[in-house]
Amino acid sequence: MRTPMRLITAALFAALALAIMVQPAVAARSLSIEGETTLSLNGNMTFRGESVEVICPITLVRTMSRFIPKIIGILKGRVIAVILPAPRTCRTSTGTLTEITPLEVERGAEEVWRLYYRGFTGTLPSIIKIRLRIAGFRIRIVINILGTPVACLFEGEIENDDNLGREGLLTETTIVEPSTLALREGSGLCPRRVEVRGTLRPLNTVRYRLV
């Protein structure tokens, strides 16, 4: 009886050792992007501060690395273009919007408009969200209030989630609330900070895969 018991015990230890070896390998797997690595996202973005709210249609164009190690804080890509229509297409709760301009998007060497990996949501190998962070988000908003232009420059970080559907298909990107931009330049009429909200949908097909 001792020999079968020893064989069973040895088999259990071998299975446990194999599980321990395999688990880190799965956890260490990287993400890959199938499809175009330059992605256009279109939707509405809301900037809400004290006594003022501005809602504008917007298109963000971002470029991403083809392979992304699952390391929190790693640089994943950057926003290379922010397309905003004429101010008259936006809505504002106070005054008249005369300008809304993203700043320094073209400065690729600087810490502006950088896209970082924050983690994921789901149970491996099924991932339902890729969590990201845009660092160096800078935007200038000018509102005419009773004939006086009020110019405000806001800057900060915006957290957003890439929401995935079947087979890792990117279905939409949502801004995680509260994502807040702080006032960097402006008069006392500017809000000290604005909360940013929005949902953007991809204009081209992108899938995330574990590799």
Image (spheres, rainbow, N blue to C red):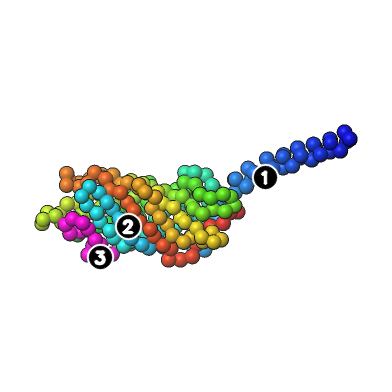
Q: Residue 22 carries which label?
A: 1
Q: Quadrant of the C terminus?
A: bottom right
* Residue at (22% x, 47% y) in the render: 50
Q: Which of marks 2 and 1 is nearer the N terminus?
A: 1
Q: Nearer the viewer, residue 22 or 93?
A: 93
Q: Which amino acid does the dot numbered 2 rest on? A: Met
Q: Residue 89 carries which label?
A: 3
Q: Which of 20 and 76 is in front in this view?
A: 20
Give, as a single range, the part of the protein colored magenta: 85-97
Q: Which amino acid does the dot numbered 3 rest on? A: Thr
Q: Which mark is residue 207?
A: none
Q: Which residue lies furthest to the front in this view?
A: 1
On the picture, is 51 further left or further right than 22? left
Q: Residues within 10 Å of mark 2 (few under 14, many from 20)?
A: many
The percent coordinates of residue 182 (x first, y second) are 28, 44
On the picture, is 177 further left or further right than 3? left
Q: How crowded is mark 3: few (under 14 residues within 10 Å), some or many (20 or more)?
A: few
Q: Distance between the residues labelled 3 and 1?
A: 54 Å
What residue is disc 2 on?
45
In this picture, is 59 found above or below 4? Answer: below
Q: Earlier in the sequence, mark 3 or mark 1?
A: 1
Asked whether disc 2 touches disc 1, contact meaning CB atoms under 8 Å apart, the reply is no
The percent coordinates of residue 139 (x first, y second) are 28, 52
Any part of residue 68 in sight: yes
Kind of element beneath mark 3: helix
Quadrant in the rendering for residue 96: bottom left
Please tell me whether residue 88 belongs to the stretch shown in magenta. yes
Q: Which amino acid does the dot numbered 1 rest on? A: Val
In this picture, is 181 found above or below 3? Answer: below
